[in-house]
Structures are given as C-alpha cells and as structure tokens.
Amino acid sequence: MNSGSYAPAQNLRPKMTNPRTHLYLALLALRLAVATCAAQPTNPPAGGNPSTNATHTVNPSNPNQTMTFPFQRTDEEWRKILTPEQYQVLREAGTERPFTGKYWNMKEPGVYRCAACGAVLFTSRDKFDSGCGWPSFSDLAAKGVVVERSDTSHGMRRTEVLCANCGSHLGHVFEDGPAPTGLRYCINSVSIDFSGTNQLGEKAPEKK
C-alpha cells in the first residue's frame, strides 16, 4: 500500500435544514407582505379636490387622461357623511393597522360595498385568508367596479385601488393571490361595508 497521506472521506449525507430557518423565512415573507400593504400611498387622494367636479388621474403616464367619478360630494359633505377614520382612509388614502379591522377574518356569505357610496365591490365567494391582516379578495364583484393607478411611494411599486363610483381609496392589488386570477386585493375594512345574504337589497352583480 502507498504510505502517502490520504484526505479524509467527504460526508455524503445531505445536510438537514434547520426548522428555524424555514420559520424565519416564513415570518420574513409575512412581515414583508404586511409592510407592503401598510405603507400609505403618496399620490394625491381622490378626495383631495373639494370641488363637485373633481377629477382623478387614472393613468400616471398620461397626465391628461382623467375621469370624473359618477358619485360626487364636496369635501365638507364627505366629512359629514363619513366618520373621522373613514375619511382618513377613504378620502385621504390612509391605512388601518393590520388585524384590527372588523372584516379581516369575516367568513359569512354576502357582499362588500364601498363605505363611502354603497357600490358593490367584492363578494364573499372571492374572499380568502392571505395572512396579511386585511380583508383579501381574489376578484371583483363585477368588472369595472374599481379603477387602478400606479403607486411608487416608499420605494415600492404598487397598484392602488379606488372605487370607480366615487374615487375613494380602498387599498392595493398584488399579483400573489390564488388561482385562477392570481390577484390579491388587499382592502381596508374601514373602506367597505358588509351585507349578509339575508340583508341584501339587490343581487350581487354577475362577473363578465
């Protein structure tokens, strides 16, 4: 035999991943999702113009592309209609704290309306538990009930969601939701009102 030195044999057994690593990564992902939802947009809110002829830029790449929302109120009227918390979120694009809203864990069947104007926005059939602490929906109640605009505040690129009827701030939409849409509408509880199936005055609109 060769009396030369030999390198020790390598351990070919696969390394076991520390369970704490998985837990840390899961918590990190959840924390990132919460932080992304919680950051308030710096875009001018839809309710920033008290005029009854208020318009809102829908496409930030084209400043001339604006729309007038069907449901109009002056700023003074909004302050009388809404609670201070509703006004801060709906008309000033604020954000409620996660896991504090009354609908984040709601599981009853029904529809969710804009808290400012009453337009039907979402239904319970598309609500799911995303773990982010805000009501989450994978789809809209009907096409065109919300409008979107780009939000680049806080060093992030997000898509803000507004009520198409009155222009009120609802939350944001992300592309990390369940199939088949792959969308997650992250909505403030204070921005919506829930009507159970036994309280509906009208049938929820059919999707198109």
Image (spheres, rainbow, N blue to C red):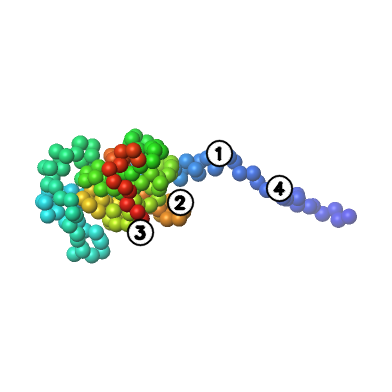
Q: CA–CA distance between discs 2 and 1?
A: 27 Å
Q: CA–CA distance between discs 3 and 2?
A: 19 Å
Could you tell me residue 92's position as x and y percent? Answer: 21, 45
N-term mark: 4 or 1: 4
Residue under numbered circle 1: 20
Residue at x 40%, y 50% (from the top left corner): 138
Q: CA–CA distance between discs 4 and 2?
A: 37 Å
At label 2, the amino acid type is Pro
Residue under numbered circle 2: 178
Residue at x 33%, y 44% (from the top left corner): 111
At label 1, the amino acid type is Arg
N-term mark: 3 or 4: 4
Could you tell me residue 63's position as x and y percent? Answer: 20, 63
Mark whose residue sits in front, 2 or 1: 2
N-term mark: 1 or 3: 1
Could you tell me residue 166's position as x and y percent? Answer: 21, 50
Residue under numbered circle 3: 208
Residue under numbered circle 4: 13
At label 4, the amino acid type is Arg
Residue at x 49%, y 43% (from the top left corner): 26
Q: CA–CA distance between discs 1 and 3?
A: 45 Å
- CA neighbours of label 4 inside 10 A, class few (<14), some (14 to 19), many (20+): few
Q: CA–CA distance between discs 4 and 1?
A: 20 Å
Q: Nearer the viewer, residue 21 or 183?
A: 183
Mark whose residue sits in front, 3 or 4: 3
N-term mark: 3 or 2: 2
Report if the CB atoms under discs 1 and 3 are less than 8 Å apart.
no
- CA neighbours of label 3 inside 10 A, class few (<14), some (14 to 19), many (20+): few
